[in-house]
Image: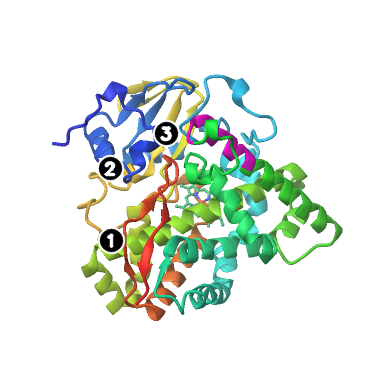
Amino acid sequence: MTQLATPLDELNLNRADLFEQGQAHDVFRYLREHQPVHWNREGKRNVGFWNITKYEDVMFISRNPELFISSKDIGSAYPKDESEFDPETDDRGKHLIKMDPPRHVRVRRLVNKGFTPRAVNALEPHIREITNHILDDIEHKERTDFVLDVASQLPLAVICEMMGVPRKDWPYMFQLTNKVLGAADSEYQTDVPDEIRGTPEGAQETARQGMREMRQYFAAQLADRKGERKDDLLSLLVDSEDKGETLTDDEILWFAFLLIVAGNETTRNAISGGLHVLSEHPEQRKKLQDDMSLLPSAVEEILRWVSPVMHMARVATDDVEIRGTRIKKGERVVMWYPSVNRDEDIFADPYTFNITRDPNDHLAFGIGEHFCLGAGFARLELKVMFEELFRRFPDIQVDGEPERLRSNFIGGVKHLPVKLR
Ligand code: HEM
């Protein structure tokens, strides 16, 4: 039986250092076995919350969006003092992922056009072209940082092109998404005073800077599209209308922000995490490279294994019981995807990486009302990337330790040294 170094009532999953070496699988395993609905004590600045670690419970929460709402933020760290929210960057209730029904349903219908299976499939040739450009740029090298030069480049290009962000600004978007989602990592706290670098204040300020700058950037882009429409999602959003429903300028700006952030950081980590796990399981990798028709199933196993988004939170709108534990109205529940994707009650041999796993109903993209809007794009990007990567660099090898992102939200790798041949 697994043992924990920290007593259960002191365990705090808000601590990013718990996740610096990996996804805290030993902690999750213990919680699933001993206390699947676990009260996470409050912190100095943050309220306490319930850690939810079993698959069926995450299904229940996600499928009841009126009982468990998203508009009171979706992260595990929620300030005790509401005045900590800065009006300029307070995005609660402003975009899809932090909206509740019925508005959520209507807005999702408005923005859905660009994300239908047909729209996604139509982009496959172009995604392949972009992938090959990225690989052309490393062709002459012996070694490279796979995250910076490959994994981060594809989602960045796809989402920026979709939004009509000019190429010269892509590195800037990369920098801003790192600031927003990698805020707790001092590598991205580049513009804060030395005294607060590496502290929660440094993280908060870094995330705010990223949000502010991204909104300013898209405000200028939006003004431009209002003058003249282009063939991009931003222009489509300006004109979107469904049964008399439209998006306000503020909602368009927040949606642009959400897409850039959600589309980049996640897919990047699925690609680099995918190469890493395949390298750690050479027999699985050989099986795949011998028969690339296994790729769609391998992609699902990579998503289950890596679970690039580690949690989403909800707030209960009424008293409710989960597994015999009473959750009170107003309390937060935090759903841990790496845990549910290794739930022994759902997955046979959950700690075995098996590219032909069937069934594989992982929840890496969530489930229910807020199911990932970009899942089709993410799956396609992963498929095309591994097809082209293994075609052009069949012997690519991880060549050093991955450097993990300091975060309890994104299960990520910042740097992954590889040898290309
Ligand atoms: C491997 C890559 C990805 C993973 C693991 C991932 C994961 C998730 C998860 C877990 C949610 C559910 C949120 C919830 O239940 O509260 C979500 C929602 C969302 N994702 Fe993704 N995502 C990925 C890629 C993308 C991409 C490429 C895009 C955009 C092109 C995107 C856009 C969104 C949006 C807009 C939502 C909000 C949907 C809603 O609230 O209705 N994601 N994603």
Q: Residue at x 46, y 32 (%)?
A: 76
Q: Nearer the viewer, mark 3 or mark 1?
A: 3
C-alpha separation, residue under disc 2 versus residue under disc 1: 22 Å
C-alpha separation, residue under disc 3 versus residue under disc 1: 28 Å
**In this rendering, would 174 be left or right of 76?**
right
N-terminal label among 2 and 1: 2
- Amino acid type indicated by mark 2: His
N-terminal label among 3 and 1: 3
- Secondary structure beneath disc 1? loop
**In this rendering, would 168 be left or right of 5?**
right
Q: Quadrant of residue 105?
A: top right
Answer yes or no: do the residues labelled 3 and 1 have beta carbons within 8 Å?
A: no
- Secondary structure beneath disc 3? strand
Q: Quadrant of residue 127?
A: bottom right
Q: In this figure, which residue is indicated by the disc labeled 1?
A: 358
- Amino acid type indicated by mark 3: Val
Q: Which residues are magenta?
A: 198-209
* Relative vertical location of residue 66 with respect to residue 96 in this rendering, above or below: above
Q: In this figure, which residue is indicated by the disc labeled 2?
A: 25
User: Label 1: few (<14), some or many (≥20) within 10 Å?
Assistant: few
- Amino acid type indicated by mark 1: Asp
Q: Is residue 318 magenta?
A: no
Q: Quadrant of residue 334?
A: top left
